[in-house]
Image: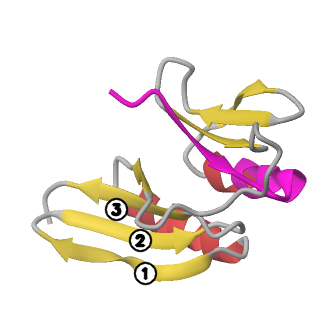
Amino acid sequence: MIGYVTFGTNDFDRAAKFYDELLAVIGAKRYMESDKFIAWAVSPTQPSLGIIKPYNGKDACLGNGTMVALVMDSKEKVDAVYKKAIELGAKDEGPAGPRGGGFYAGYFRDLDGNKLNAFYFGKE
């Protein structure tokens, strides 16, 4: 149902470098790009994540209660994405681990303060 999600950024080059390295962990690459927008995806037919310079020219800001969840196909990938995010300077919002009911996730904020998680849902 979701085609793509974008995060506004006030430091485009820094955000691009962060997501290039972070999303490489799951095999995602840039597939759309301009001087104001970059989108990454594992496949162009799959949902993507992007960064954007706000169209209205104002500073990017955070949405209270907004979070993007990145689905993984294993707990090991959750661990790898969470670890890479922290290595790249992301802020810990809850380390990777079981959350109950087969839900396994790690939470972090990117360099602009956007909240994300990497999660796996399956057998414990």
Tell which circle, 1 or 2, labels the residue nearer the N-terminal end.
1
The segment highlighted magenta reads 1-20
Tell which circle, 2 or 3, labels the residue nearer the N-terminal end.
3
Mark 1 is surrounded, within 10 Å at the Cα level, by few (under 14), some (14 to 19) or many (20 or more) other residues, namely: some
At 15% from the left and 63% from the top, the residue drawn is 102
Circles 1 and 2: CB atoms closer than 8 Å? yes
According to the picture, the residue beneath numbered tag 3 turns out to be 75
Query: Which x, y percent locates residue 104?
Result: 28, 67
Would you place residue 40 above or below residue 19 in this image? above
> In the picture, residue 76 is in which quadrant?
bottom left
According to the picture, the residue beneath numbered tag 1 turns out to be 95
Q: Nearer the viewer, residue 55 or 89?
A: 55
Would you place residue 73 above or below residue 103 in this image? above
- Cα separation, mark 3 vs mark 1, equals 12 Å
Q: Quadrant of the C terminus?
A: bottom left
Query: Which x, y percent locates residue 121?
Result: 22, 55
At 45% from the left and 68% from the top, the residue drawn is 79
Query: Which x, y percent locates residue 89?
Result: 72, 76
